[in-house]
Amino acid sequence: MARERGRDDEREGLVIGPTTGGPDVTREPRGLGPTARHDAQIAADVCRRLGEHASLDASAVDVHVKDGQVTLEGRVHDEPARHVAELIADAVPGVRGVVNRLATARG
């Protein structure tokens, strides 16, 4: 499971869920203004979703969140896994952007 470090904005976006028989991608409403999520909530949600994804080993991924900006650091298996991790993080309510600094085991 991914590790979190973290801190606000909410808007409509894609939600990519675990591959457990349900839809992998759905739409979730996100509000603006006073209901904005805290970075710690965003980080926890990103970590949970990364850890739940059936095809992604996120055990070596660190998640940092500041003002809704998510930074992913660490290592994943390959380039497709790196891209999936970024998509998952970007789909979390409250995320304003994602900086993907993940390295791959297969260069």
Image: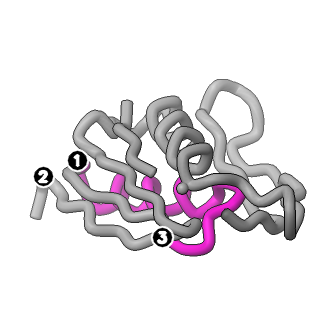
Asked whether 61 or 31 is in front, the reply is 31
Dot 1 surroundings within 10 Å: few (below 14), some, or many (20 or more)? some
Dot placed on the residue nearer the N-terminal end, 3 or 1: 1
Give me the C-alpha separation between circle 3 and circle 2: 21 Å
What residue did someone put label 1 on? 77
Query: Helix, strand or loop at disc 1?
Result: loop
What residue did someone put label 2 on? 105
Left or right of residue 14: residue 66:
left
Give the amino acid at mark 2: Ala
Dot placed on the residue nearer the N-terminal end, 2 or 1: 1
Query: Helix, strand or loop at disc 2?
Result: loop
Indicate the quadrant containing the N terminus: top left, top right, bottom left or bottom right: top left
The answer to whether 92 is drawn above or below residue 107 in the figure is above
Residue 60 falls inside the magenta stretch: no
Write down the region rendered in magenta: 76-97
Asked whether 13 or 32 is in front, the reply is 32
What residue did someone put label 3 on? 98
